[in-house]
Image: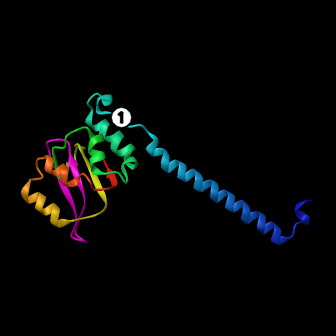
Amino acid sequence: MIFSKITLSEKLGIVNNMRRIILFIVFIVITVAAKAQCNQPYKSFDQFRNDTTAFLRYNFKTRADCYKGKTVAYVLKDLQLRPKSYVALYSTKTNKYRGICIFMDDKGYIDAKTKNQYIYIYWKGLLDDEGVVKLGRTYDSDIWVQQHYDFFKDNIVGEIIY
């Protein structure tokens, strides 16, 4: 009975207001869900009883969003493991580097049959190739040295993939 006295334009106004409220609630839920992934606490390597795979999976896959916007130095501090080697990830479209793949095992390459121990660190922006090429000529990427850390440490992380 009440709705029968409401005009069509008033009904449309009520429907539009309900849509706005629903969209606002959905926006809040999505925002909270996106932030919730980073609320998981960091766990040290010892807490995984020296299980490198479990450590990397939890800290650098489950918590990957926690590292966006941080420096490579911050990531490597949390990594707790000394990298064995790395491979620079080259972007052929721009002649610049988009990141590095850091290996924690002695393989130094990606094995499709088994999940060896590595993480991809993609930069927020691309890195000029001149410095990376010079670094590679001076210090081989097959063995991680302090100079590799010094070169990459201030780059801002755009994404981490395990």
* SS at mark 1 in the image: loop
Residue 42 vs 71, above or below: the answer is above
Q: Is residue 93 magenta?
A: yes
User: What colour scheme does the image use?
Assistant: rainbow
Who is closer to the viewer here, 84 or 71? 71
Classify residue 27 as left or right of residue 105: right
Write the residue at 54% across / 53% down.
Answer: 30
Q: Which residue is mark 1?
A: 43
- Please tell me in which quadrant of the rendered image residue 156 appears: bottom left
Residue 61 vs 136, above or below: the answer is above
Q: Percent from the top left, x then y, of residue 76?
A: 26, 44
Residue 58 vs 96, above or below: the answer is above
Classify residue 10 as left or right of residue 125: right
The magenta-colored residue range is: 87-108
- Please tell me in which quadrant of the rendered image residue 4 appears: bottom right
Q: Percent from the top left, x then y, of residue 15?
A: 75, 64
The N terminus is located in which quarter? bottom right
Q: Is residue 123 magenta?
A: no
Write the residue at 86% across / 70% down.
Answer: 7
